[in-house]
Amino acid sequence: MIEGVSHITFIVKDLEKATTFFKCIFDAKEVYSSGDNTFSLSREKFFLINGQWIAIMEGEVLKERTYNHVAFKIKEEHFEIYEKKILELGVDYKQPRPRVEGEGRSLYFYDFDNHLFELHTGTLSQRLKTYEKIKQ
């Protein structure tokens, strides 16, 4: 039986630049750096974001951007704080898609390697309730 998500891995061109990204925006705690040792496919670092294991590994970055993304939950009252962090880091900030009221708000942004991230204030149950109301 699946217990949950073990870890999420992102392939990045520059480990240090990606480290800055994860620490500045997500307040990620670095818990491991392989240095020149490679126990996996390439040099790597591990982080914890509120207990979620995130790995970054050196390699070829995504050639193009897509809507495939990872979304992290944030509190509504922290929305502007995170928006400021994103803008200050200078990553590519994407205008949010149109939403229906009650669905929550989102910040979309790309890292330096074309991965799309979302910070979202809503929950699945809120979204389902909102959609159900609209259908009626």
Image: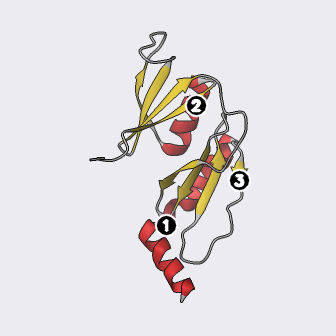
User: 114 and 73: which one is in front?
Assistant: 114
Q: CA distance from mark 2 to mark 1?
A: 27 Å
**For the residue marked with disc 1, what is the amino acid?**
Gly
**For the residue marked with disc 3, what is the amino acid?**
Lys
User: 20 and 67: which one is in front?
Assistant: 67
Query: In the displayed structure, would residue 102 be above or below residue 46?
Result: below
Q: Residues within 10 Å of mark 2 (few under 14, many from 20)?
A: many
**For the residue marked with disc 2, what is the amino acid?**
Ala
Q: Residues within 10 Å of mark 3 (few under 14, many from 20)?
A: few
Check whether the beta carbons of the residues at disc 1 and disc 3 lie within 8 A of each other: no
- Place of residue 41 in the rendered image (x, y in percent of width and height, measured from the top left): 49, 18
For mark 1, give the secondary structure: loop
Query: In the displayed structure, would residue 69 be above or below residue 23?
Result: below
Q: Which mark is residue 122?
A: 1
Q: Which residue is mark 2?
A: 18
Give the residue at the far top of this rendering. 36
Q: Which residue is mark 3?
A: 94
Where residue 80 sits, quadrant-wise, is: bottom right
- Place of residue 48 in the rendered image (x, y in percent of width and height, measured from the top left): 40, 37
